Image (tube, grey):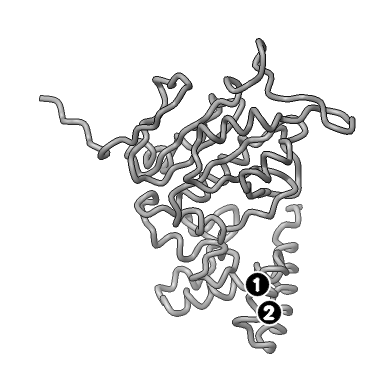
Amino acid sequence: MSEAPKSHGRLSIRASTQPRDLMAEPQVKGAWTAQVVTLFPEAFPGVLGLSLTGKALAEGLWNLRSIDLRPFGIGKHRNVDDTPAGGGAGMVIRPDVMDAALREAGGDLPVIYLSPRGKPFTQGRARELARGPGMTLICGRFEGVDQRVLDAHGVEEISIGDYVLTGGELAAQVLIDATVRLIPRVLGNQDSLAEESFSPDHGGLLEHPQYTKPALWEGRAIPEVLLSGNHAAIASWRRDMAERLTKERRPDLWRAYGQAHMDPAKDRQLSGASDQSRDYREHQEEPKR
Protein backbone atom coordinates (compact mmCIF):
# COMPACT_ATOMS: atom_id res chain seq x y z
CA MET A 1 0.00 0.00 0.00
CA SER A 2 1.50 3.31 -1.05
CA GLU A 3 2.04 6.06 1.51
CA ALA A 4 -0.53 8.85 1.35
CA PRO A 5 0.87 12.13 0.01
CA LYS A 6 1.50 14.90 2.51
CA SER A 7 -1.09 17.64 2.71
CA HIS A 8 0.12 21.22 2.61
CA GLY A 9 -3.22 22.65 3.64
CA ARG A 10 -5.69 24.56 1.55
CA LEU A 11 -4.23 26.00 -1.63
CA SER A 12 -4.88 29.62 -2.41
CA ILE A 13 -6.91 30.43 -5.53
CA ARG A 14 -6.34 33.58 -7.60
CA ALA A 15 -8.49 34.71 -10.50
CA SER A 16 -6.48 35.53 -13.61
CA THR A 17 -6.97 36.37 -17.27
CA GLN A 18 -3.65 34.69 -18.05
CA PRO A 19 -3.32 30.91 -18.72
CA ARG A 20 -1.79 28.94 -15.88
CA ASP A 21 1.44 27.00 -16.14
CA LEU A 22 0.38 23.44 -15.28
CA MET A 23 3.91 22.67 -14.09
CA ALA A 24 4.06 25.61 -11.67
CA GLU A 25 4.54 25.02 -7.96
CA PRO A 26 1.24 24.92 -6.01
CA GLN A 27 0.60 27.99 -3.90
CA VAL A 28 0.15 27.02 -0.25
CA LYS A 29 -2.22 29.34 1.55
CA GLY A 30 -0.56 31.32 4.33
CA ALA A 31 3.01 30.39 3.40
CA TRP A 32 5.66 33.02 2.78
CA THR A 33 5.53 33.84 -0.94
CA ALA A 34 8.03 35.10 -3.50
CA GLN A 35 6.56 36.36 -6.77
CA VAL A 36 8.98 37.13 -9.60
CA VAL A 37 8.11 39.27 -12.62
CA THR A 38 10.55 38.22 -15.34
CA LEU A 39 11.05 37.75 -19.06
CA PHE A 40 12.64 34.40 -18.25
CA PRO A 41 10.31 32.44 -15.95
CA GLU A 42 12.18 29.26 -16.89
CA ALA A 43 15.09 30.59 -14.78
CA PHE A 44 13.07 29.73 -11.67
CA PRO A 45 13.35 28.01 -9.31
CA GLY A 46 16.93 27.45 -10.52
CA VAL A 47 19.22 26.91 -7.52
CA LEU A 48 16.28 27.72 -5.26
CA GLY A 49 14.90 24.28 -6.12
CA LEU A 50 18.00 22.57 -4.69
CA SER A 51 19.19 21.73 -1.21
CA LEU A 52 17.33 23.13 1.81
CA THR A 53 15.41 25.84 -0.05
CA GLY A 54 14.20 23.30 -2.61
CA LYS A 55 13.15 20.86 0.10
CA ALA A 56 11.29 23.63 1.94
CA LEU A 57 9.57 24.63 -1.31
CA ALA A 58 8.43 21.06 -1.90
CA GLU A 59 7.17 20.83 1.68
CA GLY A 60 5.11 24.00 1.34
CA LEU A 61 7.12 26.13 3.79
CA TRP A 62 7.26 28.86 1.15
CA ASN A 63 5.73 29.61 -2.26
CA LEU A 64 7.38 30.59 -5.53
CA ARG A 65 5.35 32.12 -8.36
CA SER A 66 6.99 33.35 -11.55
CA ILE A 67 5.03 35.83 -13.68
CA ASP A 68 6.05 35.94 -17.33
CA LEU A 69 6.26 39.54 -18.52
CA ARG A 70 5.99 38.69 -22.23
CA PRO A 71 2.23 37.92 -22.38
CA PHE A 72 1.56 41.48 -21.20
CA GLY A 73 3.50 42.90 -24.15
CA ILE A 74 2.00 45.18 -26.78
CA GLY A 75 1.01 44.28 -30.33
CA LYS A 76 1.48 41.24 -32.49
CA HIS A 77 5.03 40.64 -31.25
CA ARG A 78 4.25 41.28 -27.58
CA ASN A 79 6.81 44.06 -27.29
CA VAL A 80 7.66 44.87 -23.68
CA ASP A 81 10.17 47.69 -24.29
CA ASP A 82 10.74 50.84 -26.32
CA THR A 83 13.47 53.42 -26.97
CA PRO A 84 14.47 55.70 -24.07
CA ALA A 85 12.91 59.16 -23.95
CA GLY A 86 15.54 61.78 -24.71
CA GLY A 87 17.59 59.37 -26.80
CA GLY A 88 20.42 57.06 -25.89
CA ALA A 89 21.44 53.46 -26.27
CA GLY A 90 19.39 50.44 -25.32
CA MET A 91 15.72 49.92 -24.57
CA VAL A 92 13.48 50.55 -21.56
CA ILE A 93 10.64 48.34 -20.26
CA ARG A 94 7.33 50.10 -20.86
CA PRO A 95 5.28 51.30 -17.85
CA ASP A 96 1.97 49.95 -19.18
CA VAL A 97 3.44 46.48 -19.67
CA MET A 98 5.03 46.34 -16.21
CA ASP A 99 1.88 47.80 -14.63
CA ALA A 100 -0.23 45.00 -16.10
CA ALA A 101 2.18 42.37 -14.74
CA LEU A 102 2.20 43.95 -11.28
CA ARG A 103 -1.58 44.06 -11.23
CA GLU A 104 -1.58 40.35 -12.05
CA ALA A 105 0.78 39.84 -9.11
CA GLY A 106 -1.60 41.68 -6.79
CA GLY A 107 -0.90 44.41 -4.26
CA ASP A 108 -0.62 42.34 -1.08
CA LEU A 109 3.18 42.08 -1.01
CA PRO A 110 5.98 44.67 -0.98
CA VAL A 111 7.38 45.20 -4.49
CA ILE A 112 11.15 45.26 -4.98
CA TYR A 113 13.06 46.16 -8.14
CA LEU A 114 16.54 44.64 -8.43
CA SER A 115 18.66 47.60 -9.49
CA PRO A 116 22.35 48.61 -9.14
CA ARG A 117 21.19 52.08 -8.07
CA GLY A 118 19.14 50.63 -5.19
CA LYS A 119 19.89 50.56 -1.49
CA PRO A 120 22.44 47.83 -0.63
CA PHE A 121 20.88 44.57 0.46
CA THR A 122 21.75 43.54 4.02
CA GLN A 123 21.13 40.66 6.38
CA GLY A 124 18.93 43.01 8.39
CA ARG A 125 16.67 43.63 5.39
CA ALA A 126 16.51 39.88 4.77
CA ARG A 127 15.29 39.38 8.35
CA GLU A 128 12.62 42.04 7.89
CA LEU A 129 11.38 40.44 4.67
CA ALA A 130 11.37 36.96 6.25
CA ARG A 131 9.03 38.22 8.98
CA GLY A 132 6.51 39.47 6.41
CA PRO A 133 4.13 37.64 4.08
CA GLY A 134 6.59 37.64 1.17
CA MET A 135 7.66 39.93 -1.69
CA THR A 136 7.16 40.62 -5.38
CA LEU A 137 10.43 41.03 -7.28
CA ILE A 138 10.88 42.85 -10.58
CA CYS A 139 13.71 41.49 -12.73
CA GLY A 140 14.88 44.28 -14.99
CA ARG A 141 16.40 43.90 -18.44
CA PHE A 142 17.84 46.24 -21.07
CA GLU A 143 18.37 49.77 -19.68
CA GLY A 144 15.82 49.28 -16.92
CA VAL A 145 12.16 50.03 -16.18
CA ASP A 146 10.21 53.24 -16.84
CA GLN A 147 10.43 55.32 -13.64
CA ARG A 148 6.73 56.17 -13.69
CA VAL A 149 5.58 52.63 -12.98
CA LEU A 150 8.11 52.33 -10.14
CA ASP A 151 6.74 55.52 -8.59
CA ALA A 152 3.12 54.52 -9.15
CA HIS A 153 3.55 51.22 -7.29
CA GLY A 154 5.84 52.55 -4.55
CA VAL A 155 8.57 50.14 -5.59
CA GLU A 156 11.62 49.68 -3.36
CA GLU A 157 14.93 49.46 -5.23
CA ILE A 158 17.57 47.07 -3.86
CA SER A 159 21.12 46.36 -5.06
CA ILE A 160 23.10 43.21 -4.26
CA GLY A 161 26.44 44.92 -4.99
CA ASP A 162 28.33 47.60 -6.86
CA TYR A 163 28.30 45.91 -10.25
CA VAL A 164 25.90 45.43 -13.16
CA LEU A 165 24.30 42.16 -14.33
CA THR A 166 22.60 41.48 -17.65
CA GLY A 167 19.29 41.02 -15.81
CA GLY A 168 17.70 40.80 -12.40
CA GLU A 169 17.05 37.05 -12.30
CA LEU A 170 20.29 36.12 -10.52
CA ALA A 171 19.85 39.01 -8.09
CA ALA A 172 16.27 37.90 -7.40
CA GLN A 173 17.49 34.41 -6.52
CA VAL A 174 20.04 35.93 -4.14
CA LEU A 175 17.33 37.91 -2.32
CA ILE A 176 15.00 34.94 -2.14
CA ASP A 177 17.69 32.55 -0.90
CA ALA A 178 18.95 34.96 1.77
CA THR A 179 15.39 35.50 2.99
CA VAL A 180 13.87 32.01 2.74
CA ARG A 181 16.65 30.44 4.83
CA LEU A 182 15.53 32.64 7.75
CA ILE A 183 11.98 31.27 7.68
CA PRO A 184 11.40 28.88 10.61
CA ARG A 185 11.97 25.17 9.81
CA VAL A 186 13.74 25.84 6.48
CA LEU A 187 17.18 25.20 7.97
CA GLY A 188 17.62 21.90 9.73
CA ASN A 189 19.41 23.61 12.65
CA GLN A 190 18.18 27.13 13.37
CA ASP A 191 20.96 27.54 15.97
CA SER A 192 23.43 27.81 13.08
CA LEU A 193 21.99 31.27 12.33
CA ALA A 194 23.17 32.65 15.68
CA GLU A 195 26.92 32.59 14.98
CA GLU A 196 27.04 33.26 11.25
CA SER A 197 28.27 36.52 9.72
CA PHE A 198 26.10 39.61 10.32
CA SER A 199 23.99 37.87 12.98
CA PRO A 200 22.73 40.26 15.70
CA ASP A 201 23.41 37.49 18.24
CA HIS A 202 27.01 37.65 17.03
CA GLY A 203 27.22 41.43 17.29
CA GLY A 204 27.07 41.88 13.51
CA LEU A 205 30.64 40.56 13.18
CA LEU A 206 32.03 38.36 10.44
CA GLU A 207 32.11 34.67 11.30
CA HIS A 208 35.23 33.12 12.82
CA PRO A 209 37.32 30.62 10.77
CA GLN A 210 36.03 27.04 10.60
CA TYR A 211 38.05 23.79 10.70
CA THR A 212 37.37 20.04 10.48
CA LYS A 213 39.27 16.75 10.12
CA PRO A 214 42.05 15.92 9.47
CA ALA A 215 43.79 17.66 12.39
CA LEU A 216 46.90 18.13 10.26
CA TRP A 217 46.60 18.83 6.53
CA GLU A 218 49.45 19.83 4.18
CA GLY A 219 51.52 20.87 7.19
CA ARG A 220 48.74 23.09 8.54
CA ALA A 221 47.27 22.23 11.93
CA ILE A 222 43.91 23.02 13.48
CA PRO A 223 44.45 25.62 16.26
CA GLU A 224 45.10 23.71 19.48
CA VAL A 225 42.41 25.52 21.43
CA LEU A 226 39.72 23.97 19.21
CA LEU A 227 40.91 20.49 20.19
CA SER A 228 41.23 21.29 23.90
CA GLY A 229 37.65 20.53 24.95
CA ASN A 230 37.64 23.77 26.94
CA HIS A 231 34.37 25.31 25.79
CA ALA A 232 35.01 28.68 27.46
CA ALA A 233 38.42 28.98 25.81
CA ILE A 234 36.96 27.96 22.44
CA ALA A 235 34.20 30.55 22.72
CA SER A 236 36.76 33.23 23.62
CA TRP A 237 39.01 32.26 20.68
CA ARG A 238 36.09 32.36 18.25
CA ARG A 239 35.00 35.79 19.49
CA ASP A 240 38.57 37.14 19.21
CA MET A 241 38.96 35.78 15.69
CA ALA A 242 35.60 37.22 14.62
CA GLU A 243 36.65 40.61 15.95
CA ARG A 244 40.06 40.48 14.26
CA LEU A 245 38.64 39.44 10.88
CA THR A 246 35.96 42.11 11.01
CA LYS A 247 38.43 44.84 11.93
CA GLU A 248 40.80 43.78 9.16
CA ARG A 249 38.31 43.13 6.34
CA ARG A 250 35.22 45.23 7.06
CA PRO A 251 36.10 48.56 8.73
CA ASP A 252 32.49 49.70 8.28
CA LEU A 253 31.13 46.81 10.34
CA TRP A 254 33.93 47.24 12.86
CA ARG A 255 33.10 50.89 13.47
CA ALA A 256 29.46 50.02 14.16
CA TYR A 257 30.48 47.16 16.45
CA GLY A 258 33.09 49.25 18.25
CA GLN A 259 30.65 52.01 19.10
CA ALA A 260 28.40 49.52 20.88
CA HIS A 261 30.80 46.95 22.33
CA MET A 262 34.49 47.73 22.11
CA ASP A 263 36.82 48.98 24.83
CA PRO A 264 39.44 51.31 23.19
CA ALA A 265 42.24 49.32 24.86
CA LYS A 266 40.94 46.10 23.29
CA ASP A 267 40.70 47.88 19.94
CA ARG A 268 44.39 48.78 20.08
CA GLN A 269 45.26 45.24 21.16
CA LEU A 270 43.41 43.79 18.18
CA SER A 271 45.17 46.20 15.83
CA GLY A 272 48.50 44.71 16.87
CA ALA A 273 47.09 41.19 16.73
CA SER A 274 45.78 41.76 13.22
CA ASP A 275 49.24 42.84 12.07
CA GLN A 276 50.81 39.76 13.68
CA SER A 277 48.13 37.51 12.16
CA ARG A 278 48.75 38.98 8.72
CA ASP A 279 52.53 38.49 9.06
CA TYR A 280 51.97 34.89 10.17
CA ARG A 281 49.71 34.11 7.22
CA GLU A 282 52.14 35.63 4.75
CA HIS A 283 54.91 33.48 6.23
CA GLN A 284 52.73 30.37 6.01
CA GLU A 285 51.83 31.11 2.39
CA GLU A 286 55.44 31.45 1.21
CA PRO A 287 56.15 28.84 -1.50
CA LYS A 288 58.06 25.79 -0.32
CA ARG A 289 61.63 25.62 -1.57
- What is the number of callouts on the image? 2
Indicate left or right for 138 with 193 as reference.
Answer: right
Is residue 119 or residue 191 the one in the foreground? 119
Q: What residue would you read off at disc 2?
A: 270
Identify the secondary structure beneath mark 2: helix
At 49% from the left edge and 73% from the top edge, which residue is drawn?
225
Task: Look at the image and tell me in which quarter the N terminus lies.
Answer: top left
Quadrant in which residue 269 is drawn: bottom right
Indicate left or right for 98 with 136 as reference.
Answer: right
Do tag 1 and tag 2 residues touch (Cβ < 8 Å)? yes
The image shows residue 23 at horizontal and vertical percentages of: 40, 22
For label 1, count other residues whose C-alpha is less than 10 Å away and answer few (under 14), some (14-19) or many (20+): many
Amino acid bearing label 2: Leu
The image shows residue 152 at horizontal and vertical percentages of: 65, 43
Whether 114 is drawn above or below 202: the answer is: above
Indicate left or right for 194 with 170 as reference.
Answer: left
Is residue 254 or residue 120 the one in the foreground? 120
Identify the secondary structure beneath mark 1: helix
Is residue 92 or residue 122 the one in the foreground? 92
The image shows residue 143 at horizontal and vertical percentages of: 77, 33
Whether 139 is drawn above or below 214: the answer is: above
Is residue 214 or residue 63 the one in the foreground? 63
Between the C-alphas of marks 1 and 2, the distance is 6 Å
For label 2, count other residues whose C-alpha is less than 10 Å away and answer few (under 14), some (14-19) or many (20+): many
Q: What residue would you read off at disc 1?
A: 244
